[in-house]
Amino acid sequence: MTISHMIKLSEKSEKHLALHFGNSKSAGSVFFTEVFANPSELLQYVNSCEPSETIAQTGNREALIFHMAEAVGNSGIIQRSHVLPENTIVESRNGFQVEVALLKQLELTYEFCVIVEKTDGESHVITAFPGAYSLPFPYEGQDKEEFEKSTLFWQEYILCRKA
C-alpha cells in the first residue's frame, strides 16, 4: 500500500497522540514540542514529505518511518536486558497492564514512525511516536502471525519513562 494522498487525523487518534507530545507523564516515546508542538503540526510535516521507509502491516495498515537531522524526541522503549528488575513497575495503559522501566535518562531519537490505516480510499493516522519502528502490543483481532510477532517483540522490549 502506498500513500499517495493526504493522511487524516481522527478525533480519537488525536486524543491518543496527546500521550506522545509535550509534557506527557505516560510511559513511552514523547516528541519534543520545539519540533512538533502538537499532532496537527506532525501531520502537516508527514503530508509534506515522503517517508524514509515504509513497512506493510496487516489490516490495511502501514508504518511510515521518517528520519530527521535533529532529535525529534525521546525513545520510549528499551531492551529488557538493559533494565534491572527492581527498576520496573506495572501501569495501566489503554485498559491493559504493562511493564514500564523507570530510567534516569531516555535515549534521544532522530526518527519517528506514523502508523496509518487505509479504508475506503482514505488514510488515517492510528498512532505516531518518536523512535525506531516497533510492533504494537499484542491485541485481540490480530492475525495469529502478527500476534506471535508482537508477543515476542514485547518479551524482548519494555516501555520506559523518566524516573
Image (tube, rainbow, N blue to C red):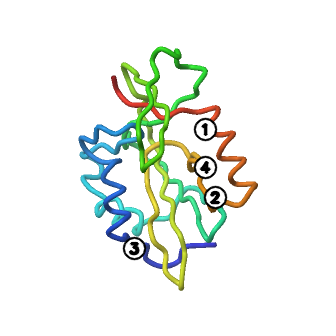
95 left or right of 60 in image:
left
Precedes in sequence: disc 4 or disc 3: 3
Q: Quadrant of residue 59?
A: bottom right
Kindly state the secondary structure of the residue where label 1 is placed: helix
Q: Residues within 10 Å of mark 2 (few under 14, many from 20)?
A: few
Precedes in sequence: disc 4 or disc 1: 4
Residue 83 location in percent, x, y? 52, 19
Q: Amino acid at mark 2?
A: Ile
Kindly state the secondary structure of the residue where label 3 is placed: strand
Residue found at x 60% / y 73%: 2
Residue 96 location in percent, x, y? 47, 45
> Marks 1 and 4: in contact by CB < 8 Å?
yes
Cα gap from disc 1 to disc 3, whole angstroms: 29 Å
Query: Which residue is nearer to you in this view: 5 or 60?
Result: 60
Precedes in sequence: disc 2 or disc 1: 2
Query: Which residue is nearer to you in this view: 34 or 158?
Result: 158
Which residue is identified by label 3?
8
The circle drawn on residue 138 is 4
Q: Residues within 10 Å of mark 3 (few under 14, many from 20)?
A: some
Query: Which residue is nearer to you in this view: 50 or 75?
Result: 75
Cα gap from disc 4 to disc 3, whole angstroms: 25 Å
Cα gap from disc 2 to disc 4, whole angstroms: 18 Å
Q: Residues within 10 Å of mark 1 (few under 14, many from 20)?
A: many
> Marks 3 and 1: in contact by CB < 8 Å?
no
Residue 99 location in percent, x, y? 49, 32
The circle drawn on residue 154 is 1
Q: Nearer the viewer, mark 2 or mark 4?
A: 4
Which residue is identified by label 2?
55
Precedes in sequence: disc 2 or disc 3: 3
